[in-house]
């Protein structure tokens, strides 16, 4: 799942809930208000958080690849320049944009500059190990053994979290779909009785509050889902 698919998911869900609200209330104003509220909640309150989540996930994945490629290449060829070239092969668009500003810099300065880009404590550890290696020498693979294990742990945890979040999203949507099906059944199966209920102001208000509750639950759910706990750099 990425930012684009998240936008498509939320907009589609908003339209579906708006259509359902019209079907069960037989009122044009309610679905319009529901659609506006859902889209406003996403683009004004949730979008920045969700975008930040996906950017951070990409940074973690890039950092994992960069550190592993750099250290392995350095252990083989003992060259910072070649290690850096191998580490930045097939960069993302964001990283490629950052690298364009580094063309005239020495490799050491490029590595330090990328600290702001990754903004992860694991990258700071990587720079500290390189500093020790430059000053004292030794076997880089041995020195970076714990670091490499930690990068693998973080990458595996990120993969697990992404899979877990997708499963929870499917469960969340499935549960609400069952609730919506009950409303649809009441609307179709008890047509005459439902019409008399709908003419009641308290019932109409309850229906409106129900859709607001759907929005609230979705908002809380997405805020919890699109959260990632990873130690950032203390720049």
Image (cartoon, rainbow, N blue to C red):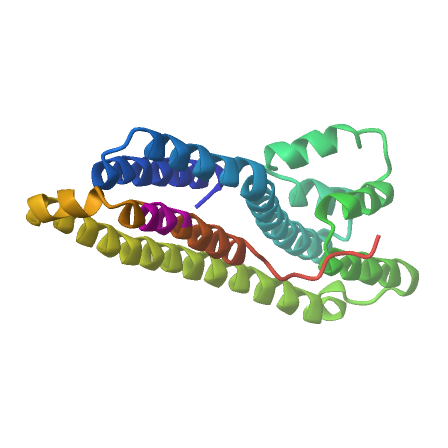
Residue 41: give x, y in percent of width and height.
Answer: 51, 40
Q: Is residue 210 magenta?
A: yes
Q: Is residue 118 left or right of residue 45?
A: right
Residue 112: give x, y in percent of width and height.
Answer: 83, 46
Residue 174 vertical placement versus 108 (above, below): below
Which segment is the magenta one? 205-212
Residue 84: give x, y in percent of width and height.
Answer: 73, 44
Residue 110: give x, y in percent of width and height.
Answer: 81, 41
Q: Is residue 203 left or right of residue 124?
A: left
In this view, the residue farthest toward the right is 135
Q: Is residue 7 left or right of residue 51?
A: left
The foreground one among 232 and 209 is: 209
Query: In percent of the image, x 33 and y 34: which residue is there?
Result: 31
The foreground one among 193 and 226 is: 193
Q: Total of numbered circles in the picture?
A: 0
Q: Main secondary structure of the magenta part?
A: helix
Query: In percent of the image, x 62 and y 39: which residue is there?
Result: 89
Q: Is residue 149 magenta?
A: no
Residue 69 vertical placement versus 153 (above, below): above
Question: In the picture, residue 166 is in which quadrant?
Answer: bottom left
Query: In percent of the image, x 48 and y 52: which residue is there?
Result: 222
Residue 30 vertical placement versus 46 (above, below): above
The foreground one among 173 and 185 is: 185
Query: In percent of the image, x 81 and y 62: which residue is there?
Result: 129
């Amino acid at each position: 799942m990425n930012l684009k698919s998240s936008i498509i998911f939320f907009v589609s869900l908003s339209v579906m809930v708006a259509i359902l609200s019209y079907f069960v209330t037989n009122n044009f104003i309610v679905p319009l208000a529901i659609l506006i509220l859902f889209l406003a909640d996403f683009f004004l309150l949730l979008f920045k958080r969700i975008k930040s989540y996906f950017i951070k996930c990409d940074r973690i994945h890039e950092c994992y690849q960069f550190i592993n490629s750099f250290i392995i290449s350095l252990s083989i060829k003992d060259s910072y320049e070649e290690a850096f070239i191998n580490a930045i092969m097939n960069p993302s668009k964001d990283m490629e944009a950052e690298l364009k500003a580094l063309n005239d810099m020495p490799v050491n300065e490029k590595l330090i500059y990328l600290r702001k880009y990754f903004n992860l404590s694991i990258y700071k550890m990587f720079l500290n190990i390189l500093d020790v290696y430059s000053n004292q020498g030794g076997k880089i693979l041995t020195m970076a053994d714990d670091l490499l294990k930690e990068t693998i742990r973080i990458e595996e945890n990120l993969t697990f979290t992404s899979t877990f979040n997708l499963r929870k999203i499917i469960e969340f949507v499935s549960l609400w779909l069952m609730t919506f099906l009950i409303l649809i059944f009441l609307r179709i199966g008890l047509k005459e009785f439902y019409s008399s209920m709908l003419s009641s102001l308290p019932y109409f208000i309850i229906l409106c509050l129900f859709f607001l509750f759907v929005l609230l639950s979705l908002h809380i759910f997405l805020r919890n889902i699109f959260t990632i706990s990873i130690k950032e750099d203390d720049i």
